[in-house]
Amino acid sequence: MKGMTLIVKTVVRIMAGVIFIYGMYIILHGHLTPGGGFAGGAVIAGSLVLLVLAFGSDKLNLKLKEKGSAIFESLALLAFITLALIGFGIGMHVFFGNYLPKGEIGELISAGTIPLYNIAIGVEVAAALFTIFLALVIFKEEVKS
Amino acid sequence: MDVLISIILVIMILGAVFALNARDLLSAVISTGLVGYSLVICFLLLKAPDLAIVQIVVETITLVIMIAVVLDSSKEELREKTLINLKGVSYINFRYVLNLLMITSFGCILFYFFFESIELMAPLGEHITRMSTAYIKMAAEKTGSANLVTGILFDFRGYDTLGEATILFTAVIGVITVLRIYGRKKDKLVNQ
């Protein structure tokens, strides 16, 4: 896959980081404003897809990046399950129990374990969508060559 | 609000019908995007901002992946595609008449049951809440989150969210298993 023109590359160089930070904001404020782990992870995956499309796959080693994102996805799902299992042993002895202290409603650090679950789900969704995109791109290049 | 949602539903049906009869693949993919983006407006009219955010982002990413990866977005390949011409086949043959009869009969049955059941249902957007009243009352106290949807999704119904994450995981495993076999065979041939 070839890269795009110089204009597209310059605009993407400015905008990709801003889109990435906006996705992190949606994930971290999931318990205060509409949004959460699923929506923020999809925004982060969109910024990574934009980088690969604009700069082309000639200078990037895509197979290495696919291996890394698959490892990230598995680790995020494992972290989600371990957080739920800690709640099984501490406090109310309930699977997915809320064992951390709940602060005041409406502040950033509140709601117990819900922000941690949001971060794990966000990383998982972003890595899953990016891995599917990379697998499709690598398959298309192998068929052409 | 009912009139607006009815107009948007008609637009969605028109976009889906146009996708079947488009000249080339690119306009078909773009007209299926019309269905997804009008669904976003439906979610906003029915007061569900969380769903609207997820729908608009996922729709954009799938459209980009379809156009950039599955299709070759060069115009030369799209020009080479020719329409399948149905010259020499008359429209009055056995299969055509049978399909028309089946479609009309099923349509009549569905419309009969729809008109029977619409008198018993609640009006649009005012569903009868049996269990969710307890959730709405206790969610802010018990979970401590200002957003009610995430409070239910990660505390009361955490087990369902675990299942949803597992579905994504198995989808990625399936895609990698199907698409990367070709490359591994080629690597073995090069090494030998």
Image (tube, rainbow, N blue to C red):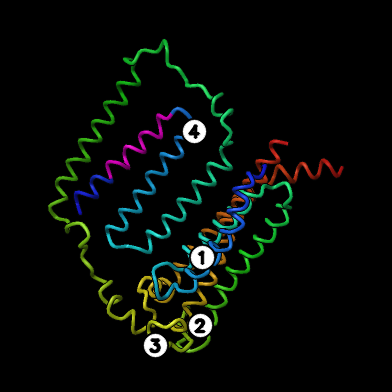
The residue located at (40%, 32%) in the rendering is: B20
Q: Say which element carries label 3.
A: loop
Residue type at the position of mark 1: Gly
Q: Chain of mark 2?
A: A
Residue found at the far left of this picture = B119
Q: Chain of mark 3?
A: A
CA gap between label 3 and label 1 equals 25 Å
Residue found at the far right of this picture = B192
Residue A104 numbered tag: 3
Residue type at the position of mark 3: Glu
Residue A35: % across, % down:
42, 67
- Pointer 4 local density, CA inside 10 Å: few below 14, some 14–19, many at least 20: some
Tags 1 and 2 both on a single chain: yes
Q: Which residues are magenta?
A: B9-22
Instruction: Tell me which label, 2 or 3, sits earlier in the chain.
Output: 2
Relative to the observer, which residue lies in front, A89 or A60? A60
Q: Quadrant of residue A46?
A: bottom right
Q: How many marks?
A: 4
Q: Say which element carries label 4.
A: helix
CA gap between label 3 and label 4 equals 53 Å
